[in-house]
Image (spheres, rainbow, N blue to C red):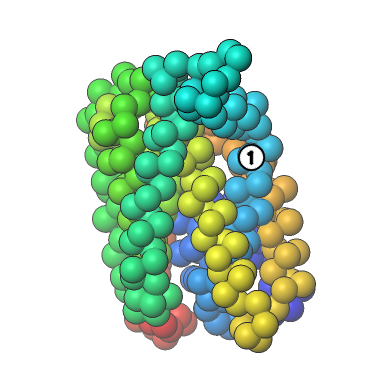
Amino acid sequence: MGIFEAIILGLLQGLTEFLPISSSAHIRIFGDLFGWGDPGAAFTAIIQIGTELAVIVYFWHDIVSIITKWFRALPFGWKNPVKQSDPDVRLGWIIIIATIPIGVLGFIFQDTIETSLRNLYITAFVLAVFGLLLGLADKFSKRTIKLEDMSIRDGLIVGFGQALALIPGVSRSGGTITTALLLGYTREAAARASFLLAVPAVLASGFFQLFKSSGDGTLVLGPTILAAIIAFVVGYAVIVWFLKMISTKSYTVFVVYRVLLAILVVVLLGVGALSVF
């Protein structure tokens, strides 16, 4: 992998990771379209570390509050303990519980995820289907529940929605946001849940892939790190824009984009401009 390729893929990762349009699908499609081939699940997972660091920086105060209060709610004889009913404590438990589905399913189906599920016909199909699901959820859900009111049960359900992103094209943020909207959460709550729930799952996946790929010659570390840095900078800007945008706009533009992209992928596959694997 060259420097130019790393720059482009880093930009793609930063631009698409937090939007419900599937960053893994874009990296897979663009890599093939420009003759770079599939950069692989390891590269994709590792540069996601860059975008998750952007989440940590942006939500630093929220994350510190959640972690601090969660520990202070444990029965360790703290001088100023926090009650388990505190919203930040509950959110801490929700993040932990919601991470379990993607961790377990990702481990069980690791080989399938890294091979057969990277079929571009599958990617095109789920881009369209889950785009339409997002549109329906956004249009017909009641959108009244705030993030601080999320229950443990809802958190687990949203966690399974996040786990659907193991299929390239679903979109981790898209799966999480769609599920949260269907449960009745506001657009802002769904988006913030998507950001916060992703941190442990994506970081764990990225560092696992980094450990697994180190020394086996399948990963060029320099360009991968460069791509992760670019993804961090661009990703931070996207977080700021996205949260501002959904405060007044619907997700319709992303639904239309996903469907059009799915059609384009099928056409490019049909004319031989893209390869299935």
Q: Quadrant of the C terminus?
A: bottom left
- Residue 41 lies, in percent from the top left, at 51, 71
Amino acid type at mark 1: Ile
Residue lying at 73% horizontally and 65% vertically, measured from the top left: 225
Q: Which residue is mark 1?
A: 56
Residue lying at 41% horizontally and 20% vertically, measured from the top left: 84
Q: Quadrant of the N terminus?
A: bottom right
Residue lying at 46% horizontally and 82% vertically, measured from the top left: 273
- Location of residue 137 with respect to 128 vertically, above or below: above
Left or right: 185, with 197 as reference point: left
From this viewpoint, is residue 88 visible? no
Q: Nearer the viewer, residue 67 or 271?
A: 67
Examine the image and state in which quarter residue 179 appears: top left
Count the labels in the image.
1
Q: Nearer the viewer, residue 94 or 260?
A: 94
- Location of residue 130 with respect to 250 vertically, above or below: below
Left or right: 2, with 75 as reference point: right
Q: Nearer the viewer, residue 94 or 71?
A: 71
Q: Residues within 10 Å of mark 1 (few under 14, many from 20)?
A: some
Q: Residue furthest top?
A: 80
Residue lying at 32% horizontally and 47% vertically, measured from the top left: 161
From this viewpoint, is residue 196 visible? yes
Secondary structure of the residue carrying tag 1 is helix
- Residue 180 lies, in percent from the top left, at 33, 35
Q: Residue furthest front?
A: 77
